[in-house]
């Protein structure tokens, strides 16, 4: 059952890891859990909704002010 050991050893410390298709260096410094990803997706969603809301109601607001 456990014929191959996939754990890292001290000999593997400092060696370059083989990159996969989804390994990006831009985001590799952060510990991405599902909670972290959900938080950033929520922030991006809120900014997008506020942008759409501003574009939709911008003209109505300007006519009432001036």
Image (spheres, rainbow, N blue to C red):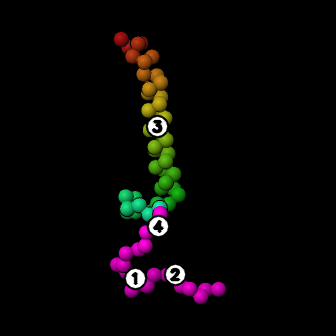
Residue at the location (43% across, 73% down)?
A: 18
| C-alpha distance separating marks 2 and 3 | 42 Å
**Residue of label 1:** 12
Q: Position of residue 26 (x, y in %)?
A: 37, 58
Check disc 1 and report its element: helix, strand or loop.
Answer: helix
**Residue of label 4:** 20
Q: Which residues are magenta?
A: 1-21
Indicate whether 14 appears above or below 58: below
Q: Residues within 10 Å of mark 1 (few under 14, many from 20)?
A: few
**Residue of label 2:** 6
Q: Residues within 10 Å of mark 4 (few under 14, many from 20)?
A: few
Residue furthest front as drawn: 21
- The label shown at residue 48 is 3
Check disc 3 and report its element: helix, strand or loop.
Answer: helix
Q: Is residue 30 visible?
A: no
Q: Is residue 18 left or right of residue 6?
A: left
Indicate whether 57 appears above or below 50: above
- The label shown at residue 60 is none
| C-alpha distance separating marks 3 and 4 | 31 Å
Label 2–label 3 contact, CB within 8 A:
no
| C-alpha distance separating marks 4 and 1 | 18 Å
Is residue 2 within the magenta segment? yes
Q: Kindly report which numbered mark, 2 or 4, lies closer to the viewer in this rendering.
A: 4
């Amino acid at each position: 059952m456990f014929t191959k050991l996939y754990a890292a050893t001290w000999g593997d410390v400092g060696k370059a890891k083989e990159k996969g298709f989804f390994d990006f260096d831009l985001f590799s410094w952060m510990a991405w859990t599902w909670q972290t990803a959900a938080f950033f997706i929520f922030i991006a969603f809120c900014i997008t909704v506020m942008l759409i809301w501003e574009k939709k109601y911008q003209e109505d607001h300007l006519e009432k002010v001036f």
